[in-house]
Amino acid sequence: MSAPTRRPIGSRIAWRHMGGHIWRYTLEPVDGGTKVTEEFDWRPSRAPFLLKLMKTPKQNAASIEKTLKRLRDVVS
């Protein structure tokens, strides 16, 4: 279960996973649409060594690229 760390007021939505790491979406207005940035911040994790060992940051970076592409395809 994830717990919100910030309410969706303005341009950022963030939540903290039970493991301590944080997911964020930042929405910024740009000409013709919205720039969406997704972030996985594993630094506050309760077990950063485990995430690094499991290559989670690298895997999540690839997954973020796929998610943002799918989002772009759906809303375009």
Image (tube, helix red, strand yellow):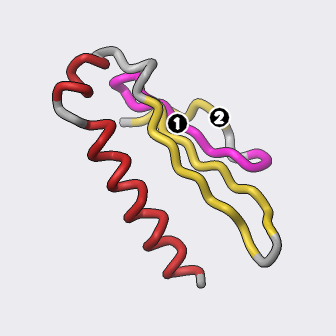
Q: Is residue 33 left or right of residue 6?
A: right
> Does 66 sit above or below residue 3?
below
Q: Position of residue 52 (x, y in %)?
A: 25, 26
Q: Residue at x 51, y 81 (%)?
A: 74
Crowding at dot 1, Cα within 10 Å, few <14 / some 14-19 / many 20+, comes out as some
Q: Residue at x 44, y 73 (%)?
A: 70
As drawn, the label of residue 6 is 2
Q: Nearer the N terminus, badge 1 or badge 2?
A: 2
Q: Position of residue 53 (x, y in %)?
A: 17, 25
Say which amino acid is labelled 1.
Trp
Crowding at dot 2, Cα within 10 Å, few <14 / some 14-19 / many 20+, comes out as few
Say which amino acid is labelled 2.
Arg
Residue that sits furthest to the left in the current view? 54
As drawn, the label of residue 15 is 1
> Does 28 sit above or below residue 34?
above
Based on the picture, tell me whether residue 16 belongs to the magenta stretch.
Answer: yes
Q: Secondary structure at mark 2?
A: strand
Q: Position of residue 39 (x, y in %)?
A: 51, 43
Asked whether the beta carbons under mark 1 and mark 2 sit within 8 Å of each other, the answer is yes
Q: Please state the extent of the stretch shown in magenta in the rendering.
A: 9-21
